Image (tube, rainbow, N blue to C red):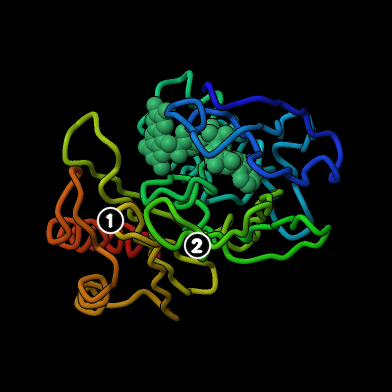
Amino acid sequence: MNTIESWRSARTRQDLVLAPGEAVLGGGTWLYSEPQVGTSGLVDLATMRWPSIEDTPTGLRVGATCTVAELARIRRREGWAAHPIFFQAASALLASFKIWNMMTVGGNICRSYAAAAMVSLAAALDATALIWTADGGEYTLPVADIPTGNGTNRLAHGDVLRCIDIPAHALRARTAFRKTALVEIGRSAAVLTGRLDESGRAVFTITAATLRPVVLRYDALPSSVRLREDVLEADGYYTDPMGTADWRRAVSAVLLEEILEELRAWS
Ligand SMILES: Cc1cc2nc3c(=O)[nH]c(=O)nc-3n(C[C@H](O)[C@H](O)[C@H](O)COP(=O)(O)OP(=O)(O)OC[C@H]3O[C@@H](n4cnc5c(N)ncnc54)[C@H](O)[C@@H]3O)c2cc1C
């Protein structure tokens, strides 16, 4: 990275105010993977010492610097029917254990690739992002609303993702998960999730197959015909070397129907 001239370890919120050309550094697995010609300085988030995992009165808080490996092995709390989805989502990332141990939840979400598995996880569990702004303010938004395309998002320059909050009701829900890729060792082409809350409400998500997360909500488990129609009509299926838009649409419908059946067996 021969454009990098400075490195700072962030320890206070003031340290996160970026100078021109600076970028925040999560695990560095993407930043170090290709030239960053527009970047001249890095600001390391690791030294902020944010807790990786915190139990809160409303659910679970995952710090932006929590690694995917830490989240994948999170201990199951009593009543957490959704617990398997943490490991399942982490496994959807095409990455060796070396990358797993470095890449952060925040880096994955903020890189905002369509195949961002931490976005899949967060969308499945209705997680909310807490964003710190450069002027000292903050705001929240659903993680599913952060990506605007494959590798683009609605964060302003200087916004820092501090953490994501997962509500307790989603952690208690039954979940089901599917991932497919066109080649065995390939980036996810479609990641599908389903969630059945104790209230009977159901949530299905499509990621990796679409440019932005698609979240389908129902007051109760839908019929397979209704779900299939909604999946086929969803926006944003795209074509790239990992699969064509038509194939992504079709495979999403098939796999979400499987998920529906799996959730139906629990109800
Ligand atoms: C071998 C390999 C396999 C990969 N497989 C996949 C895959 O299957 N799916 C996929 O989606 N991606 C994949 N990637 C790319 C992937 O998105 C990133 O490598 C990883 O998730 C980034 O996390 P990181 O913590 O290392 O982020 P970094 O590389 O540190 O940063 C990534 C970007 O996010 C910004 N950023 C980091 N943290 C924050 C924060 N808290 N707030 C605001 N901005 C922040 C950085 O400035 C940078 O622009 C892969 C990369 C590699 C090298």
Residue occupied by mark 1: 209
Which residue is painted at 83% across and 57% down in the image?
Answer: 136
Measured from the top left, where is residue 153 in percent x and y?
50, 58
Circle 1: residue type: Ala
Circle 2: residue type: Ala
Report crowding for label 1: few under 14, some 14 to 19, many 20 or more residues within 10 A (C-alpha): many
The secondary structure type at the circle numbered 2 is: helix
Q: Is residue 125 left or right of residue 16?
A: left
Q: Nearer the viewer, residue 60 or 173?
A: 60
Up-down: is 144 above or below 242?
A: below
Measured from the top left, where is residue 104 in percent x and y?
58, 35
Q: Is residue 41 left or right of residue 233?
A: right
State yes or no: Cβ of the residue under disc 1 lies below 8 Å from any atom of ligand 1. Answer: no
- Numbered badge on residue 144: 2
Report crowding for label 2: few under 14, some 14 to 19, many 20 or more residues within 10 A (C-alpha): many
Q: Give the Cα separation between the discs numbered 1 and 2.
A: 14 Å
The secondary structure type at the circle numbered 1 is: loop
